[in-house]
């Protein structure tokens, strides 16, 4: 083997000079770590879990900022009785000063054969009430966005840990060879904590999510440099082969190097993505009736792309809503929640119906919710926290709602409850760790045995916590 010092140029020089124009040159800064395809022998080759899974794909619709459960999926009529009065709740601790009971301005109606009560905010989602498994007893650790986002996405609120999507791609691999196994869509820039929400943490970088700025619809803006307008594919292939050989020699001289191996696979993936990505993100291929069903907004476009990605074997898709204008409505809650729900409701309903019609819902787990809920009492004016209006709600991690559909959960089912005012989870409480343990179970993993050894100890998504919520399993 030719020594490195006899090579005509270094790897770094070769990378700088080649200007391959492949998607990989954009994927690096986009995801902060390399990705790979699910080809045999790669780190993302499809793998078998501990036991037969109910779900094989995850769609996580993240309602960023904390939507109000008492205005969406957890009706509390008693709030109207106490309107303008203090609630008889001992130790009603909130992050900011709060006041009297704040009844929901939205009407609730029963839907489906199950008779599930859902707010007028979500008429399209409500059409699928019999497919929804609503957990009304969620709770988290703190009423702050940053740690709660990380807890929800990574199972740890402070330290660097792999995200749920990274754990799933680490465990299950990918079912495609031309697209990433884990995609995160967030329009107009990244949310709070940015790429930490889909980070691979101490897992190899190939398991990190690929970020797409879905305010764009053209594939060349979604993924920079995905099309090389300077060189034909045959010339790119020759350059890629040379680069791969240089990388292999570099790796061989330094024993096993997971980062170099991942880079080699990353370039291969980027080369193949040039054709596949252009196809999957071209929504004009969908019939107009389908596009109209999802709606012409950003969320409709995101969720239609999501269905197309899932069909092509992408393992995990996280879809953010409210990153630019979050569900964090400390004031003007009625106006803002109505606007945000209108942006997302039709598309979510279309996605659920589309997945069901295509026979995909049974093996696709859909998760909706934010990092926490909101208080049943009104937030009082305070400089810097709202606009001096008394018509919004503060953060509430003591009790909130999330729902799941498909993927082995019971449809038309409500699990747990908050107190009669909606402040705290009191019946069958479900912590984020419990939710993660249950989701891993649906994907065929015992969360206590699903580990990765790092820094001398075995880590897991649920750390030393979590119990499977068996009551919601089908």
Image (spheres, rainbow, N blue to C red):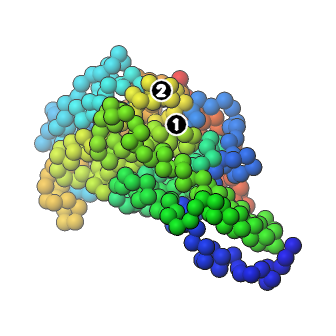
The reply to whether residue 370 is in sight is: no
Spatial separation of the CA atoms under disc 1 and disc 2: 9 Å
User: Which residue is the site of mark 2?
Assistant: 358
Q: Secondary structure at mark 1?
A: helix
The residue depicted at 85 percent of the width and 76 percent of the height is: 2
Q: Quadrant of the N terminus?
A: bottom right
Residue 229 lies, with reference to residue 59, above or below; the image says below
Q: Are marks 1 and 2 in contact (CB under 8 Å)?
A: yes
Q: Residue furthest right?
A: 1
Q: Residue at x 32, y 31 (%)?
A: 289
Q: Secondary structure at mark 2?
A: loop
- Res 411 quadrant in image: top left
Q: Earlier in the sequence, mark 1 or mark 2?
A: 1
Is residue 472 depicted above or below 376 in this figure? above
* Left or right: 305 as drawn, with respect to 322: right
> Is 90 in front, or is 2?
2
Frontmost residue, 238 versus 207: 238
The residue depicted at 39 percent of the width and 22 percent of the height is: 130
Residue 72, percent across and down?
Answer: 28, 36
Observer-nearest of 461 and 258: 258
In this view, the residue farthest toward the top is 113
* Residue 276, visible in the rendered structure: yes
Q: Which mark is residue 311?
A: 1
> Residue at the spot x=20%, y=37% of the render?
104
Q: Is residue 422 depicted above or below 269 in this figure?
A: above
Q: Which mark is residue 440?
A: none
> Could you say where residue 294 lies in the image, as x and y percent from the top left?
33, 36
Graded by Cα atoms within 10 Å as few (under 14), some (14 to 19) or many (20 or more), the crowding at tag 1 reads some
Q: In the visual, does 313 lie left or right of 83?
A: right
Question: Quick check: 232 left or right of 319?
Answer: right
Where is residue 323 drawn, in percent x and y?
34, 55
Q: Which quadrant of the structure image shows residue 259?
A: bottom right
């Amino acid at each position: 083997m030719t020594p490195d010092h006899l090579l005509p140029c270094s790897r770094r020089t070769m990378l700088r000079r080649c200007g391959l124009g492949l998607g990989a040159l954009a994927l690096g800064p986009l995801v902060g770590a390399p990705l790979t395809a699910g080809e045999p022998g790669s780190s993302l080759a499809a793998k078998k879990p501990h036991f037969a899974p109910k779900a094989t794909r995850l769609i996580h619709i993240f309602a960023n900022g904390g939507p109000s459960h008492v205005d969406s999926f957890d009706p509390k009529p008693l709030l109207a009785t106490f309107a303008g009065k203090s609630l008889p709740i001992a130790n009603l601790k909130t992050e900011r000063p709060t006041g009297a009971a704040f009844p929901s301005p939205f009407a609730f109606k029963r839907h489906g054969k199950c008779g599930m009560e859902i707010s007028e905010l979500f008429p399209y989602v409500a059409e699928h009430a019999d497919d929804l498994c609503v957990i009304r007893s969620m709770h988290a650790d703190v009423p702050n966005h940053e740690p709660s986002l990380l807890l929800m996405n990574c199972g740890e609120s402070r330290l660097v840990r792999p995200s749920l999507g990274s754990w799933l791609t680490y465990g299950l691999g990918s079912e495609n060879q031309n697209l990433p196994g884990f995609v995160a869509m967030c329009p107009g820039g990244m949310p709070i904590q940015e790429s930490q929400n889909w980070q691979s943490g101490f897992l190899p970088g190939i398991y990190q999510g690929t970020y797409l700025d879905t305010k764009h619809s053209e594939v060349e803006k979604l993924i920079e440099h995905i099309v090389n307008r300077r060189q034909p594919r045959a010339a790119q292939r020759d350059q890629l082969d040379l680069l791969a050989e240089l990388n292999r020699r570099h790796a061989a001289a330094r024993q096993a190097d997971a980062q170099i191996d991942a880079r080699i696979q990353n370039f291969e993936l980027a080369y193949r993505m040039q054709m596949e990505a252009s196809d999957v993100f071209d929504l004009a291929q969908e019939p107009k009736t389908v596009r109209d069903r999802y709606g012409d907004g950003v969320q409709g476009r995101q969720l239609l792309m999501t269905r197309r990605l899932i069909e092509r074997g992408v393992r995990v898709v996280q879809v953010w809503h409210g990153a630019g204008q979050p569900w964090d409505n400390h004031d003007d809650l009625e106006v803002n929640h109505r606007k945000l729900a209108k942006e997302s409701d039709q598309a979510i309903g279309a996605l659920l119906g589309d997945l069901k019609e295509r026979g995909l819902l049974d093996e696709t787990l859909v998760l909706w919710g934010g990092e926490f809920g909101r208080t049943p009492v009104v937030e009082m004016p305070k400089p810097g926290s709202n606009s001096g209006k008394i018509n919004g709600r503060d953060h509430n991690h003591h009790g909130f709602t999330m729902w799941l559909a498909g993927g082995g959960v019971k449809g038309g089912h409500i699990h747990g409850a908050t107190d009669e005012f909606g402040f705290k989870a009191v019946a069958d409480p479900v912590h984020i760790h419990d939710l993660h343990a249950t989701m891993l179970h649906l994907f065929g993993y015992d969360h206590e045995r699903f580990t990765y050894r790092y820094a001398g100890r075995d880590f897991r998504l649920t750390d030393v916590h979590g119990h499977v919520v068996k009551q919601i399993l089908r």
